[in-house]
Image (spheres, grey):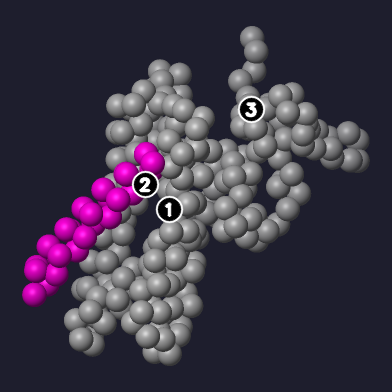
Amino acid sequence: MIEKPKYVCINCGHGVRDLHKNYSNTVKTTHCEQCKKVADKYIEFEELIILLDALLLSQQAFRHMIYNDSFKLYWKISLVLLLLESFALCRQRRDDESGSPVNEKSFYMCVLQNIGDYVFITLLLLLVTTLRGGIKFPKAGLGSFTITLLKAVVISNLSKFFLLPILVWRNNTTDLGSQLHYMLVTSHNLCSLILAYEVVGASVSRKRWLTSLFVIGVFLLKEYLKLVAARHSQNILA
């Protein structure tokens, strides 16, 4: 019986059985049978370097994080980013409401909204991908693919690290500068989501522009529904 590959090559996405082999006192990285390159160079890198490469939109780093790593660290980082994004959203609402104080209830409402945002875009991508026939669940497994897609969404949200400067220097910038900063963070997040979605392999076509249009459409739909939900929550708090 042929052993099913446990990992993937970060260069071409081809399945590999091992990322390294032990020879007495030495460890040697394995090469991909498809592209003949080192299957995963990141097994020799520190986690910080991998995170920096992910922030620089490296699909190789995305593949390593999704398929070849335990992902435990990234779940913890996603929790920190969730709190950071929620505080940024709560503070933005305070500024929009002419300096009304940030209270605990509004912060937790933002946390719940962002959690729903993560889950919603994952399910939305899953639904639309299924309708497009992008994957075959009997082969990949619905549960397994859903978790993989959620990992891709979590990785794309590493862009929220860039919200930190605007939180630190919010009082030293203009409203226009603040809006431009949020637009840049959103653009980086969208680019990350497109690349992560390609890494997951859920795209029917290999053409990047088709995948980009598909993800952008899903992203815009999510943002629209998020805006509607935000207005509804403001009415509840009022």
Query: What amino acid is found at the position of numbered circle 2 in the picture?
Result: Ile
Residue 14, numbered label: 3
Q: Is residue 83 above or below residue 212?
A: below
Name the residue tied to disc 2.
Answer: 216
**Residue 101 forms part of the magenta stretch:** no
Residue 226: x and y in percent read 23, 57
Query: Mark 2–mark 1 contact, CB under 8 Å?
Result: yes
Q: Is 235 contained in the magenta span?
A: yes
Q: Badge 3 local density, few (<14 within 10 Å), some, or many (20+)?
A: some
Residue drawn 44% across and 64% down? Answer: 185
Tell me the SS state at disc 2: helix
Tell me where the magenta segment starts and ends, as one range.
213-238
The answer for how far apart the CA atoms under marks 2 and 1 are is 7 Å
Front label number (2 vs 3): 2
Work out how far the residue at label 2 is from the one at label 3, CA to CA, in angstroms: 27 Å
For the view shown, which residue lies furthest in the top direction? 1
Please name whichever residue, 209 or 131, is drawn nearer the observer in this view of the structure: 209
Q: Residues within 10 Å of mark 1 (few under 14, many from 20)?
A: many
Expressed as whole percent of the image width and height from the top left, the position of residue 11 reads: 67, 37
Q: CA distance from mark 3 to mark 1?
A: 25 Å
**Which residue shows up at 28% across the image and 55% down it?**
223
Type of the residue with mark 3: His
